[in-house]
Amino acid sequence: METSKFFNWVKEYGWRHLIALMFVTFAVYPILFVATNSIADFANLTNSKLIPDGLTLKHYKLLSSDPLVPYFKWLYNTYKVALIAAFFNVFLGTLAAYAFSRLQFKGRRASLLTLVIVQMFPSFLAFVAIYLLFFQISDVAPFMGLGTHIGLILVYLGGSIGFNSWLIKGFMDTISPSLDEAAKVDGATDFQIFRRIIAPLSRPILVVIFVITFIGIYSDFILAAIFLKDKNLWTVAVGINTVFIDDFNADWGVIAASSVIAATPIAVLFIFFQKQITGGLTAGSVKG
Amino acid sequence: MIYLSMTLSKIFRYTLLAIFNALIVYAVPLALTFESWFFLSLILVIGILVNIVYFTDRFQPMKWILPGMIFMLSFVVFPAFYNTYVSFTNWSTGHILTKTQAIGVLEDRVFTPDDQKGLEFEMYILQDLDLNFYYVANLDSENILFGKAVSDDEIFSTSYATHEPSLFINGEFSTPDGYYQLSGKEQIANSTTLQELSLVIDKNTRAQLYKISVFGASTGRLTSTSQLYTYDEMNDAIFNNATNTICPVVKDNFECEGKEIEPGWRVYVGGENYSKLFSSQRIRGPLGVVTKWTFQFALLSVIFSFAVGLLLSMILNKDGLKFQRIYRAVFILPYAIPAFVSALVWKGLLNPDYGVINSWLGPLYEMLDIEPVKWLKTKESARSAVLLVNTWLGFPYMFLITTGALQSIPKELIEAAKVDGANGIQSFWRITFPLLMVSISPLLIGSFAFNFNNFTLIFLLSGGGPPIIGSEVSVGWTDILISFTYKLAISGGRGNLFGLASSVTIIIFALVLIISAISFRYTKRLERIYGNI
């Protein structure tokens, strides 16, 4: 009786747990490995293992003290660029979304369709042209040319603004128009309706779009790599993938530490917003 | 009275507009100087748009849309067109400049005619607090020249040496305040640097350190230089003043006695880049390999991650299964980590000499008596590795979307099938899977399109390598089209082939367009979009 109950459990549930556990290992192993290795006191990749014998913070200390690897400068650059670009991206996207959602004008459908078609092509596809364009802007206005954060932010701004205003517009459409019609009767201007009614009510989607955009920019490699040549201006993505390519074996501890610092905030943010992010993503694109 | 009737917001608006226009007015002549025609047209279009929209009250909706639109036009739409233009030029290392700029560079070149070498004099070497070098050339008591010693690059931006007789008191040199005079030994220690420096006396004359003397003053020598090339507008050729030869234009360079003079300039070359892609055997071959692999990579990535994701969501889609929430939380972890971190970490794990994967597989290698796999170093292992890692990166997304889709399939359908005698496998393939595909397929196509251009993974994990031997351009077995383009344009180590790279980009554009068209057709997504409009 007992054994048949057990076999029943195996048939119904047990095999599911077995396969699930296999993939839990697959999913988690690299993450755990790098997390423990970042505080392990072995020196290189050769003798690395999942459970270290002794613990140390030396890799983290090395990251903050090695002048050849200005890691925290990169981290600062990344947050700066991604926060500024994501903020303006959402801000300008919201303005456009308001017009698309609330104002009637000729060519509205056509412009919306254009937005969607344009955003089918990832903005980095034309990176050669972007590179050459900013190469020339460097001559005319060096402060926003190649090698500057301002130039990079401008490119990121263009990158997803169409898609974002599209998503925001979709949300604004669900806000009942009776609200702003009532305000209009009371003599409110478009700007007042936007500021007092539509924008505050859209806050949930704005937060999500901000987070998605922020994560996207934070994770970008290609545009940051062609833009930033000065080591002190690099973002984390460019930095850790540029300085650590020569000697993986000896640098492993530091690589692990820098990976943990770079990934943890994004992972936390992602898990926190996971439902909304996948909801937004399934509406059109995939996270980079 | 007019001003009183203006509201504060109007004043604010016109002030901003004035500042904006000032910037445009500032930028236009600069763009003209640098002959950036595309940049110029961009500035003009934006300038006109902004003024039309914000100067009047007639285009209310555009006031909301234009700021975002400007960025999209400038950095997404415009580059797409610019890219097309570049693909019809020879824009590449050695042909970066416009013709005017190239002539400018060539006319700045100098040479020293043989009869101009001579005249030696006393020279003193000084250093200021910032460790810049200064020379004092004592030509004669009437001509005591002082100035910063500069390298060849800085010659045209440096002011000429000045006459400073006060440096000599009773015929003895005295070091001015704020400077340090280098002794002979110190000069020898710095001789490699000093050799490169010269004191600019006038446009064609410089003083250089000639002989260092440990005791007493060193010796300098005047060199008089002349312009090497003179541009002859009438014949559209440059004249080499050193050899007295005429160097005519040949396509995109001047040629002196059959030798190309660098730099050349960029010109319109028609379809040359495209014909190179398709006819040059040593580019066509690799391009074919890369294109085929791009499709394989994107397709297999979708299939593998979808298979794993679906398997897991099917397994967890069971009432009463314990630890469901924990499993779900763990399965999305790989997705939560930025890909640039994952690629770096996996590169470490896969390292063939030190990595943990090969030490894991060690016993297996021994048992089968085979050589350890050289991960990322051979074609097959590199391709397997990028697919493995991309499956790791991609299955959580597939898990999430299939979980959602599975839960929306009515349980009654499965029950009904069971009643009709269908077993689990039959009801999966006949009912669950087809229903799943209806809602999932647009997302699968989206994932395909994403992986089609998954530059981050390929470039950071394998670098596109291992290299394909015998190709004319730098390319590897795991390169996809976008990373191939990147190597052509930026990092291939064979110069910047912007023109050729742009033509490959156009191919990618076309392929993405086709994929999107299929996706639209296949999923009728367009109608949903129309619904949203």
Image (spheres, coloured by chain):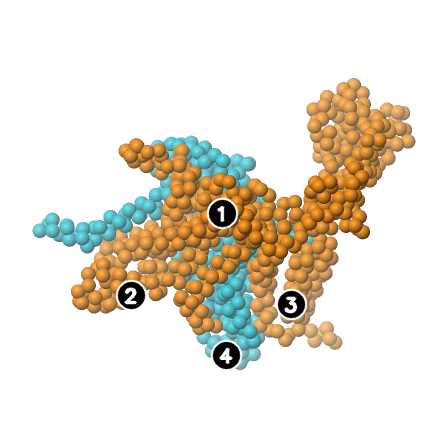
- Badge 3 crowding class, 10 Å Cα cut-off, few under 14, some 14 to 19, many 20 or more, is some
The residue at 45%/44% (across/down) is B477
- Badge 1 crowding class, 10 Å Cα cut-off, few under 14, some 14 to 19, many 20 or more, is some
Identify the chain of the residue marked 2, using the numbered disc in the image: B
Reading the image, the residue beneath label 4 is A182
- Residue flagged by tag 2: what amino acid is it? Ile
Reading the image, the residue beneath label 2 is B409
Mark found first going from the N terminus, 1 or 3: 3
The label nearer to you, 4 versus 2, is: 2
- The dot on residue B285 is 1
The residue at 37%/50% (across/down) is B391
**Residue B237 appears in the figure:** yes
Residue furthest top in the image:
B215
- Please give left or right for residue B26 compared with residue B452 in the image: right
Is the residue at mark 1 from the same chain as the one at mark 4?
no
- Residue flagged by tag 1: what amino acid is it? Gly
The label nearer to you, 1 versus 3, is: 1
Residue closer to the observer: B154 or A233:
B154
- The dot on residue A58 is none
Mark found first going from the N terminus, 3 or 2: 3
Reading the image, the residue beneath label 3 is B49
| Spatial separation of the CA atoms under disc 1 and disc 2 | 47 Å
Q: Tell how many labels.
A: 4
